[in-house]
Amino acid sequence: HRRAPIVIPTDGGYRVIYVPAISGESVAHGYQAWLVHEARSRGLPVCDLCAREEFIKRGTEERGRVRDLGTADKYEEEVIKSCVVEDVGGFLAPTQVPVKRTSRFMVSYVIPAIEDVKASTIVPQLHVRHAPSQVAGGQQVAGQMLYYVETSSAVYTFTASLDVDGIGRKSFLTVKYVVDSVERRKRVEAAIMAFYDILAHGLFGAKQSRFKPHYEVLSAVATITHPNPYNVLVGHSRDYISRVAENLERFKELTGSKALMGYYMKEQIPKPSTPIAKEFSSLEDMFKWVMDEVLKMSGLK
């Protein structure tokens, strides 16, 4: 983890405090690692580097491949077709005409919920790294190094979104789907399931072999909208699910968009009273519903 500054309200105004945080880059790396697994299990293409979970996303060896806008357009199409991870996670090729694809998966930092921020803590743990005996000054000495690893605990919250319409569609110069509907459906399914993998089981971040977190999902909310995008309100207050439901109703009325909402809660927090909100008894049931409704709304089912 790392530390991040957040602004919290006080009786006299606001103040800045530093809290344990997980970067969006860490979450996105875990997401793309599981996207590799989900894509390959469906027979979808993944490039060699992404298959090794090395998300370099195009290096200097590509420089001479794109010399003008025409080849830039074809280059994006070629990459989308050849790698699901770069289709969903984006890439930036440092070619003579740089080619950029924005990630279809967007995620915030993971930080403690502001309403419960006083229940978070950071503690350094002392460790010793021991190397085999070495010869120094004519005698045997043991090689050791002391170092600290910070550990933390909190009730965390974060938000993420997925641009489903953008999957399998090039957008750098021209906007056009470059994979057929059968493959696009598989790509959408893989993208949704990769997010389930990291959310349900906390399968992201470093030091999983010795610092595997005690992790449990206390509550979650999912919204599906079309054609306008919608970002859920972050869970910094215990009534966040109710607030999302009320806000989504107003969003639907204002934009005329299709809008659906599902939620899961294990903790004792207020339930929404608006009819747009659908409750699920498990995270798995909620994701099954999300998958079904997304495919319907996208015309892939």
Image (cartoon, rainbow, N blue to C red):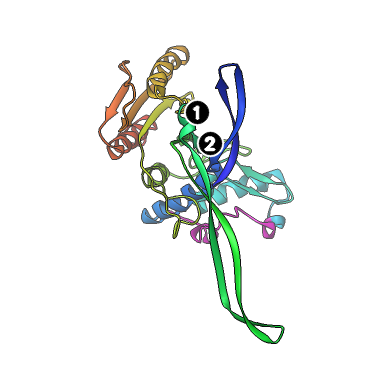
- Is residue 137 shown above or below 162? below
Residue at 60% x, 21% y: name it.
14
* First in sequence: mark 2 vs mark 1: 2
Determine crowd level at label 1: few under 14, some 14-19, many 20+ residues with C-alpha closer than 10 A.
Answer: many
* Picture quadrant where residue 262 is located: top left
Which residue range is magenta in the image? 44-62
Name the amino acid, label 2. Answer: Ser
Circle 1 SS class:
helix
Instruction: Indicate whether residue 49 is drawn in magenta.
Output: yes
- Count all numbered tags in the image, as a single digit: 2
Which of the two residues, 160 or 128, is positioned nearer the viewer here? 128
Label pair 2/1, CB-CB below 8 angstroms: no
Residue bearing mark 1: 114
Figure check: 295 above or below 145 = above
Residue underneath mark 2: 108
Q: Which of 13 and 103 is in front in this view?
A: 13
Q: Distance between the residues labelled 2 and 1?
A: 15 Å
Element class at badge 2: loop
Residue 122 in the image: above or below residue 237: below
Asked if one can make out residue 117 in the rendered structure from this viewpoint, the answer is yes
Q: Tag 2: Cα neighbours inside 10 Å, few (<14), some, or many (≥20)?
A: some
Across and down, in percent, residue 17 comes to 60, 32
* Residue 39 is covered by the magenta coloring: no
Report the predominant secondary structure element of the magenta stretch: loop
